[in-house]
Every structure is written in structure tokens, then in C-alpha cells.
Image (cartoon, rainbow, N blue to C red):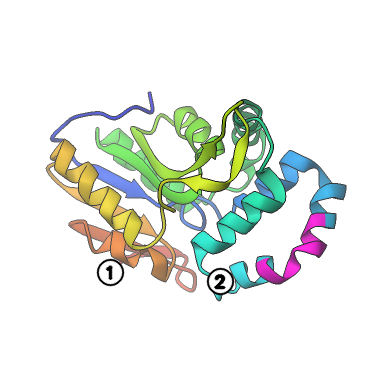
Amino acid sequence: MCCDVVSAKPVAFFDFDGTLTTGDTLMPFLKFLVGSPIYYTKLTVNSHYILAYFLKVLRNDVAKRLLLKGYLAGYRLGHLYEKGQKFADEIIPLMLRREGMELVKWHQSQGHDCVLVSASFDIYLKAWARRENLSSVICTNLEEKDGGLVSDTIFGKNCHGNEKSERIANWIKNHNPSKTYAYGDTAGDLPMLRTVDYGFMWNERKQQFVRV
């Protein structure tokens, strides 16, 4: 499935990292891609900005460009999609948040569209979305240079914060859903949650999603 569906039925937008999973997926993907020895060597060399990324003191888009330059630039995009498929099949299922996935299944059982909205990369998100029969994916895309190699920057804008809400607003305009829901887990998801009729934030203390 995983294609843009034009319909007036309700839609639920889901953040990925921390909402449908129990944590970040980008660093585990990089480890899966390059292997533990290279991953930890690069981690040591680049520890200053990786730490800043996790502490939220470095802008998400800046951190992403640095990670691209350090880990992904120079790979063939086709190879990354192949590794992304394996990551989606073998690793992501071990990282899923039960409460988030139950909401996905509930919305699907009601006939609602389910759209993944994430700052993470398309190279594994699209494969996972197909696996789970999601309607569409809104995410950050890698830039491909001549020869099929990945550059050290992203294609278009980083799908984070206000960019998420803008893309969701555009999706709503094009698809005209009857009701809109969204689920997130961090302050960066608040613009997205305020764009819809019903926004819910993961509450770690209560271990449940609460209305915002």
C-alpha cells in the first residue's frame, strides 16, 4: 500500500521515534549499516555533535547534515534502501512501542488512513510503512548526486517541528479528511499536534498518550 490516498475518511498522523518506537532509530540504523567497529570509531570521533544532538542543544537539521557527512555520504542510494528494508524487517520490530502500535491498528480497523510523519530518513521508514500497511509517509529524504551516490545534505527541508505541521496541513488540504488525529512524544511534535482536531502526546510517567 503506502501510497497517497485521496479520501474524506479520518486520518491519524504518527510521529515515529519515541511514539511508535521506544527511542531513536537513526543511530541504530547507522550501526546496522556500517557494523559495530566502524560505528563506534566514528561515534568517538564525532561524539561532540552526536551528544549535542541527543541533548537537543544542536538543531535537528544541523545534526542530521553532520551525521550524513560522517556516516552516509558516498553510499549508493540503492544500497541504502536495501539496508533500510532489512533494518525495517529485522530491527525495527524489536524497538516498537506497544501502546503506539495498538493505536495504529485501532485506526486501521476503523478504516482510517494512517500517515507516518518523521524527521528520520526515508531509506528505512518507507520500507517499514509498507510492511505495516500505512497510507503514506512524510519524512526527511536523502539527496542523490550524479551516479546514484548520496550527498552530504538532505533533499528539501528537514521534516521536524514546524515543517511537520506544514506538511501535515498540506496533506489535509489535498485529501480533505473528515477528522484528523496526531500522536507525538516531544515538544518538537507540538506544532503537529496543534494542526489537527485531536492531538495526543506520549506521557512517560503515565505510560499512555494524553490529549494536548
What percent of the width, then of the height, locates residue 64?
57, 56
Q: Where 191 sits versus 155, above or below?
A: below
Which residue is pictured at 40% across the width and 66% down the height?
Answer: 188
Q: Which residue is mark 1?
A: 212
Camera-side residue: 111 or 164? 164
Which residue is pictured at 34% across the width and 55% down the height?
Answer: 164
At label 1, the amino acid type is Val
Quarter of the image with the C terminus is bottom left
Which residue is pictured at 50% across the width and 60% down the height?
Answer: 61
At label 2, the amino acid type is Leu
Number of numbered discs visible in the structure rendering: 2
Instruction: Please indicate, yes or no, whether residue 23 appears anywhere in the rendered image.
Output: no
**Mark 2 or mark 1, which is nearer the start of the sequence?**
2
Instruction: Find out whether residue 126 is within the magenta segment.
Output: no
User: Distance between the Cα atoms at labels 1 and 2?
Assistant: 26 Å
Residue 45 appears left or right of 21: right
Camera-side residue: 133 or 65? 65
Residue 19's disc number? none
For discs 1 and 2, the disc positioned in front in the rendered view:
2
Local SS, label 2: loop
Residue 205 appears left or right of 168: right
Instruction: Find out whether residue 43 is within the magenta segment.
Output: yes
What percent of the width, then of the height, locates residue 39?
79, 51
Residue 210 appears left or right of 19: left
Q: Which residues are magenta?
A: 42-49
Crowding at label 2, few (<14), some or many (≥20) Cα neighbours within 10 Å?
Answer: some
Q: Where 18 sits versus 7, above or below?
A: below
Q: Which residue is mark 2?
A: 58
Query: Farthest residue toward the front?
Result: 146
What percent of the width, then of the height, locates residue 108?
32, 35
